[in-house]
Image (spheres, rainbow, N blue to C red):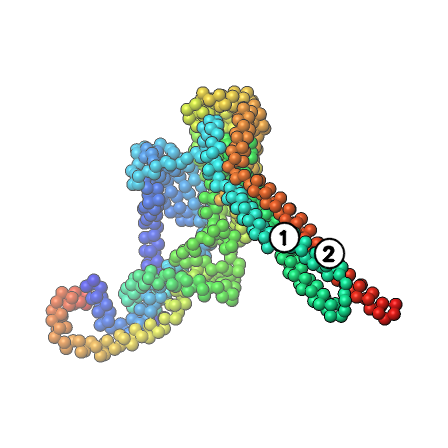
Amino acid sequence: MIRKSGWLIFLSILGAIFLLVYVFAGTAIRFGMVYSLEKAAGAEVNIQRVSLGLFPLSLTISDLQITDAKAPEQNLVSFARANAELELWPALLGYYVISDVSVEQLAYGSERRRPGKVFRGELADTEDSGFDFASLFAIELPDADELLARANLTSVAKGEALQQLAQSEQQQVRQLRQQLPDSERLRELEQQIKALTDGDIRDAADLAAKTEQLRRLKAELEQDKAKVEQVKTALLQSREQLQSAVRDFQQATQADWQQVQSYANLADGGLAGISQLLLGDLWTERLQQLYTVYQLVAPYLPEGSRLEEQPEPRELPGRILPLKQQPYPNFWIKNASISLLIGGGNAELRIEDITAQHHIIDAATRFVLDVQQLPMLQQFRLDGNFAIFDQLQSEVNWQLQGLQLAERVFGEGSTRFGLEQALLNSRGGLSLSGTALSQQASVALQTPRFSSGDNRYVQQLTQLMNQQAEIPFQLRANGTVTRPNVRVSSPLDRIVADAVMGEAQARFAGFEQDLRSKFNAKLPDTAGDQQALLSLLDREQASTEQMSQQIETLLQAQLGDLRDRALDRIRGRIGG
Amino acid sequence: MLTMLARILKVLNSEASPWQIGWAVALGLCAGLLPFGLLTVLILLIACLFTVNLSTFLLVWGFSKALLWLLAAPLEQLGWNIGQQDWLLSVLSHSETLQLLHLHHSLVLAAFLLSVLILFPVAWLTTRLVLKYRHVLMPHLNQWKVVQLLKASKLAQLYQKMN
């Protein structure tokens, strides 16, 4: 039942497996890395050596070079040596806890000893700076007629509707007028009533006949009175309709004018702030790079706090179950140090506690980047932290001094505007909570030199800006990480607006006047129709009111007279 | 391929006890279904210490590794679902030994449970099948003309050579 040589066989098999792994693992990892990186980069990848260490358990990668697919004589990324030390006990439990990671001489764009092979064609550079200085300084004002045509004015339709309403209502009022009793008929009725009330009553039969006659006259008057009331109501409705139509027309006119103003950019004086134009888009682009970082950490964020639903990661051969008390994060690098070769100097990046499960170690990932004494930069320090608890939280601060800006040209031809030289200093902070971004920074261009084309606006601007020893900017951004709202402000805005844009503002004022008069001309002249209907309504209302009172008086008077005289006669007969 | 078939036939026709073959198949299947780790090493130790048929064990281990690749996705999902039980999570949280066996990994957990479920039935069933083969099928087969012809073939020569 028990094999006597069992232990020996077991140890032999285990030893063989261990030896196989130890001898071939390095080579296997190297081939695996080269294959994966070449697939990702689309260009040749070289790794000199990958070796495994046992005490402590470590992996060392020597001399990695990834060819830049766009420039095969250069490396996209390279480093001389990378080393990672894995802690054994957590690894036996299935957690990847790396005590130390170091990358030495990490470089971007370093020169290759020989050009690397490129497996995929380079992509065409379709990047657009998104900034058009020419459109700013050419100051080609839009044509007023074109703007009015683009505006799709609703007030024109409303005005025409108002005209039609006024005309149709006038017609209707005239028709109603015909239904009313004319003054001839009223006079006739008045005479008949007068004859009845003034005449003698001979006997009871005469009284009954006259009473009957009066009743008929009263019925006719009641009918006339009803018609008058009907006309009065109709006139009231017409007036209300007219008032409503006039109100609609006025509102539409106001809205249309605002729309036309926005097309012409007149509401803000026609010109945006110069500093917003200079740095706004640029800064927005930089902030949007944060979104790339966000996408990297998104799969680790708790559900509900993600910006958008990420596909469920399929991690085979297994996921770690959500234990009540997990001893280690699934992945944790305690210390990492990277030495970067950039711009002819060195930079040191130190990161502590890299993980996506900060709640287990109860600490945030912290990082510090120190760059000093580069030929193009005096000093740069970036420090901050980030942690994924209920949501991603991050704080970053930076301090940059003496960055020599590369020459930058905006626009072309006569409206060309170029930055020839300047030193950039900046200090600021950024905080990210979930997807909400809040950032403030101060940026200053020291001893800037600008150049310009032939356009005299640009020349004035350049002259003014070259007089400044320092141009300070304040940058603020808030909103979501995908759509940050960047505001750039500077005292420069006011100076530029006053000095350079004065003439442009005058042109805008003239343009606005022209636009207003053309806009008014475009609207239908509703005043005549509207006024005619109003005066007709006034006349008719007065006339019907008078008629109504007349009928009412007639009705009241004949009843009173008949009753009084009948009573007097009865009293006389009785003996009075 | 022929060598492998000959190897199987050799084991089936050898003096090895049916139980030794049955347990070798069951343990090999368990070792293959589990991702390589301490549990696999433990199974290997059991296979080495007890007189199970090692050739069969190693052969089935290799074959069932392919089975793991096929079953990995559903097994992983099953392990993840089972692993949501509070009591299980609590037990796994407080036991480093279980974590050392990687039972807090969804795939290992599911593969382990499946292995425990099938270990005894597979061992028993394989034993029965080997017995059936030896007592019922083998005498009949030997009488078949086809088999007699085959015996004169390369396969039979290989078989003889191995014996």
Taking the spot 59% from the left edge, 55% from the top edge, the residue there is A179
Q: Nearer the viewer, mark 1 or mark 2?
A: 1
Residue A553's mark? 2
Identify the residue under disc 1: A182
Residue A127's mark? none
Chain of residue at mark 1: A
Q: What SS does tag 1 mark?
A: loop
Position of the C terminus of chain A, as image quadrant, is bottom right
Direction from residue A527 to residue A104 in the image, left or right:
left
Residue A532 appearing in the image:
yes
Say few, some or many: other residues with alpha carbon within 10 Å of mark 1 (under 14 / 14 to 19 / 20 or more). few
Chain of residue at mark 2: A
Residue B62 rendering spot, x and y as whole percentages: 30, 62
Quick one: A131 or A561, which is closer to the camera?
A561
Examine the image and state in which quarter residue A568 appears: bottom right
Direction from residue A221 to residue A127 in the image, left or right:
left
Q: Give the amino acid at mark 2.
A: Thr
Residue A255 appearing in the image:
no
Both labels 1 and 2 in a single chain: yes
Taking the spot 23% from the left edge, 68% from the top edge, the residue there is B8
Taking the spot 43% from the left edge, 34% from the top edge, the residue there is A129
Q: What SS does tag 2 mark?
A: helix
Quick one: A299 or B1, which is closer to the camera?
A299
Taking the spot 54% from the left edge, 52% from the top edge, the residue there is A390
Residue B22 rendering spot, x and y as whole percentages: 31, 72
Say few, some or many: other residues with alpha carbon within 10 Å of mark 2 (under 14 / 14 to 19 / 20 or more). few
Quick one: A2 or A166, which is closer to the camera?
A166
